[in-house]
Amino acid sequence: DTEVTQTPKHLVMGMTNKKSLKCEQHMGHRAMYWYKQKAKKPPELMFVYSYEKLSINESVPSRFSPECPNSSLLNLHLHALQPEDSALYLCASSQGLGAPEQYFGPGTRLTVT
Amino acid sequence: GESVGLHLPTLSVQEGDNSIINCAYSNSASDYFIWYKQESGKGPQFIIDIRSNMDKRQGQRVTVLLNKTVKHLSLQIAATQPGDSAVYFCAERNSGYSTLTFGKGTMLLVSP
């Protein structure tokens, strides 16, 4: 199974809502990533987990809170988002931290109203 | 800061032609250069990578060339097919940071 799954596919939330994005992989990968991608732009790294520990936080605002419950799951908790946070949120995994080959999920299309 | 960039935002080719997608980089500390393909509605998909100590690497229908003298990377796709239509991103890995930085992307449009 070389698939990374993400739920939900689409999410619309108000600025006062709390929601969570979920990501799952069963490839035994030890590194997992969250990226944000705006339309017609490249993915931008947000967070990196290595062996279930937060390894890198690219100065992401605290309204985004990542969580890695186990080696297969990665969550992104959202609270008090702004309209400019609307984007495609991509999860990826790789065998180890920094591996050039990352496996991406299809993303969650988030709209903040 | 240093970044990876592309010369052409859109490339249109006919089916069966060879395609060349270019990328300029500026970070001399990068030890890997990678090409990803992103189809509409999907996440990026790894195509091929090349270490900084190499100048050419071939895959199935794809070839990546690295010219460190002019800091230039290219992806050649042979016999381009409609299924190759996508946005192509180059990316670089900083050897000290172990994360990928993606370039701006080129849209490849293949017409039958």
Image (tube, coloured by chain):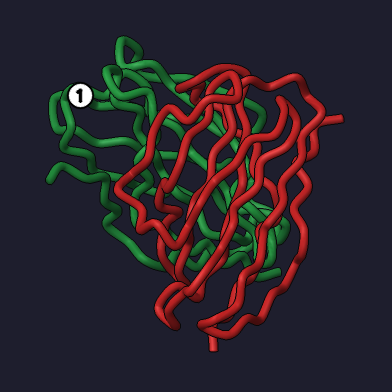
Chain colours: A red, B green
From the viewer's perspective, tell me whether residue A24 is left or right of residue B55. right
Residue A25: name its quadrant.
top right
Question: Residue A57, position in %: x, y?
Answer: 37, 40
Image: A42 above or below B68? below
Image: B37 above or below A56? below
**Which residue corresponds to the image point at 38% horizontal and 16% vertical from the top-left?**
B51
Q: Which residue sits furthest bottom?
A: A113
**Which residue corresponds to the image point at 56% horizontal and 63% vertical from the top-left?**
A78
Q: Quadrant of the C terminus of chain B?
A: bottom right
Q: Which residue sits furthest right?
A: A1
Residues A90 and B2: in front is A90
Residues A113 and B93: in front is A113
From the viewer's perspective, tell me whether residue A48 is left or right of residue A60. right
Q: Which residue is mark 1?
A: B68
* Chain under disc 1: B
Q: SS class of the residue under badge 1?
A: loop
Q: Three-letter amino acid code at disc 1?
A: Lys
Q: How many marks?
A: 1
**Which residue corresponds to the image point at 43% horizontal and 27% vertical from the top-left?**
A55
From the viewer's perspective, tell me whether residue A36 is left or right of residue B78. left
**Which residue corresponds to the image point at 59% horizontal and 57% vertical from the top-left?**
A77
Counting other residues with Cα less than 10 Å from the Cα at mark 1, is it few (<14), some (14-19), or many (20 or more)?
Answer: some
From the viewer's perspective, tell me whether residue A11 is left or right of residue B50. right
Image: B43 above or below A14? above
Q: Which residue sits furthest top?
A: B53
Question: Residue B83, position in %: x, y?
Answer: 72, 57
Question: Residue A64, position in %: x, y?
Answer: 47, 57
